[in-house]
Amino acid sequence: MELSLFFSAFAVATIGSVAYFIFVSPGFSAKFPGLEKGKPRQIFMQRLTGALIFGILPLLIILLFPEAKRMGDFGWKFPGSATFYWTILLAAVIIPMNYFNASKASNLKYYPQIREWNWSVRLLIQSAVSWIIYLTAYEFLFRGFLFFASLGIMGLWPAVLLNTVIYSLAHYPKGYTEMLGAVPLGVVLCYLTFLTGNIWVAVFTHVILALSNEWFSIHKHPEMIFKNVWK
């Protein structure tokens, strides 16, 4: 049973990642009317698709083995105080790092993902919510389903290594810089998931990373303006 879950998790993490990045590739997205590159509708559709692949698919697989596993066995449990301590510590490193990195041309080439020149409060909230949904599903797959399924088969450090390699390769479409940056982050998030027994340090940290980078990138982008209006 554990071996079946491991291979299922491995398949979703690898094949699912490939399928997702095919879907979000410019050539594939262009086939769908109304999904112009970099526009809110396209980005929201991409994140929703990612949430379905990375979140709903693992959930359905886990439900096939109700007698063997519970959601809590894959890190989906209430966070304790240690989760928040580690999140605050990581946020203290990530937020200043994103602030100083935001103005770099290599960052502004990709972020914010939504290439809208006038940002409203409504768009900012919509983007934040879509990030949270997508990243919760993403971390449930990598630091939840894949990591805990691997842990029972191969032990801590081989599971961390496998998880980090696949996690890093999943960043390939965003360039080598993000691939390399994903390695230390992947190791840290896996280890903290192991220490706390839940996925929430990974979820909170990834959300803080994404949102702070998006907001700083909007602020630093020479052509983007935030308007304090709803629409």
Image: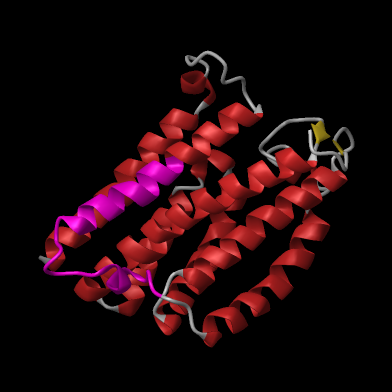
Residue 125 percent location from the top left of the image: 69, 46
Residue range in magenta is: 50-77
> Which image quadrant: the C terminus?
top right
Relative to 35, say whether 133 is above or below: below
Residue 116 screen position, x and y as percent = 75, 30
Give residue 84's position: percent from left, percent from top. Answer: 59, 80
In this orientation, does residue 10 appear? no
What residue is drawn where x is 87% and y is 32%? 223
Instruction: Give the prevailing secondary structure in the magenta stretch.
Output: helix
Question: Would you say residue 203 is visible in this rendering?
Answer: yes
The outermost residue toward the front is 230
User: Quadrant location of residue 210?
Assistant: bottom right
Tell me the quarter of the image containing the N terminus.
bottom left
Q: Is residue 184 magenta?
A: no
* Residue at x-position 34% and y-position 67%: 147
Question: In the image, is 190 to the left or to the right of 82?
Answer: left
On the image, which quarter does residue 73 sit in?
Answer: bottom left
User: On the rendered structure, is 228 left or right of 60?
Assistant: right
Instruction: Identify the residue at image location x=25%, y=67%.
Output: 149
